[in-house]
Amino acid sequence: MYLSNEIEAERAAAWADIKESQRAGNVLTAKAIGIEYFELGELKQECLKLNYNGIYGYLPTTFIDTYEFRGIQNFVGKTFEFVVSYVSFDDQIFAANRILALEKSARRFWKNGKPGDIYPAFVRGVDRYHVYLLVSGVPTRMHRDEFSYVFSDDLREEIFIGETIDVKVLEINKPNPDLEIEGDEPTAEEKRAIEGNISVSKKALEIDPMSFINEYKEKSTYLGTITKIHVDHGIFISLEPRGITVRSGFPPGSNGARLQVGDEVNFKIQDINVKERRIKGLIITPNQNYKNKSNRSYQYGR
């Protein structure tokens, strides 16, 4: 009986929040637990099904974001902010609008946000060179140079739509709706100035591994772990113990066929260029036994 009363109290509090959100536009958050089609009159839309403290809600795809998503499967299990737009007490459900919540968050950001602040950023899109983010409702594009100190050839292999990452705000240019434009329609740059724009960095929250470069010496050999193998660019290795990323060509005659991501190898440093933040070297001997069906092991060097 106590548990039942506790659940009923939680549901009553949840309904109070939902009704207040519909009335005053308060922003709530809930986890997406599935994808269903929701019908309202003649309107039928694919929606994220939300669970707000035991009350089910529906967030239509058209109200998730102004960004055009190819699909919403990645969003299941993620948490979304929203404003309640419709309530059915008979069916014990509600409809949600995330776009309104993002607009409210953006207004707060433009008022209170400062360079140096750290925010969670929602990943709304990814291509090879950029991550498209929402930072407190404000859209921005982050180049891969600001993603990490570890080089990434293709960001689509590193991060996915629907994820949330922490970023540091580098620059804020507040909206300037009164900006005088030169032509009949604003240019892309004028539109950015009118709407406001920000720049952010995930890398700024990381420790620069190259700050420990003085711990490594030329002509010396260090343990490293292969983090990526690229046909054109070679083998990327994270050196112990600081995680400095270096690159090596393929050992002679191997073409990387027996090397795998996660393998430990010995890396001999040939040259350190502090100014260019670059270490040159080569793999001497893979530091593990390569297993195959015949249980043979291979060595690339001595």
Image: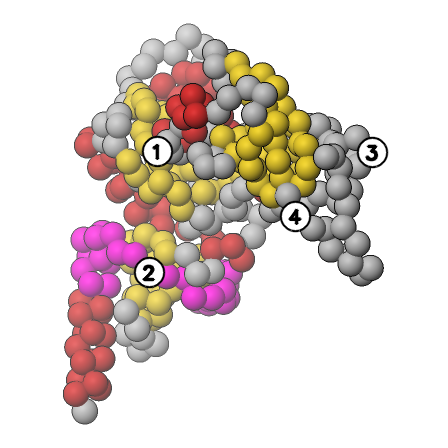
Q: Which residue is mark 4?
A: 288
Tell me the kind of residue under disc 3. Gly
Which mark is nearer the camera, 1 or 3?
A: 3
Q: Which residue is mark 3?
A: 253
Q: Which residues are magenta?
A: 17-46
Q: Which residue is mark 1?
A: 205
Q: Which residue is mark 2?
A: 30
On whether residue 28 falls in the magenta region, the answer is yes
Decide: few, some or many residues near mark 4? Use Cα within 10 Å; few <14, some 14-19, many ≥20.
few
Find the distance from the CA under tag 1 to the CA under tag 3.
40 Å
Q: Residue extending furthest front?
A: 302
Which mark is nearer the camera, 2 or 3?
A: 3
Label 3 SS: loop
Instruction: Let me know if residue 24 appears in the view.
Output: yes
Q: Are marks 4 and 1 in contact (CB under 8 Å)?
A: no
Tell me the kind of residue under disc 2. Ala
The quarter in which the N terminus is drawn is: bottom left
Vertically, is 6 above or below 185?
below
Q: Residue 184: where, in percent of width, then height?
A: 45, 14
Residue located 28% across and 69% down the image: 53
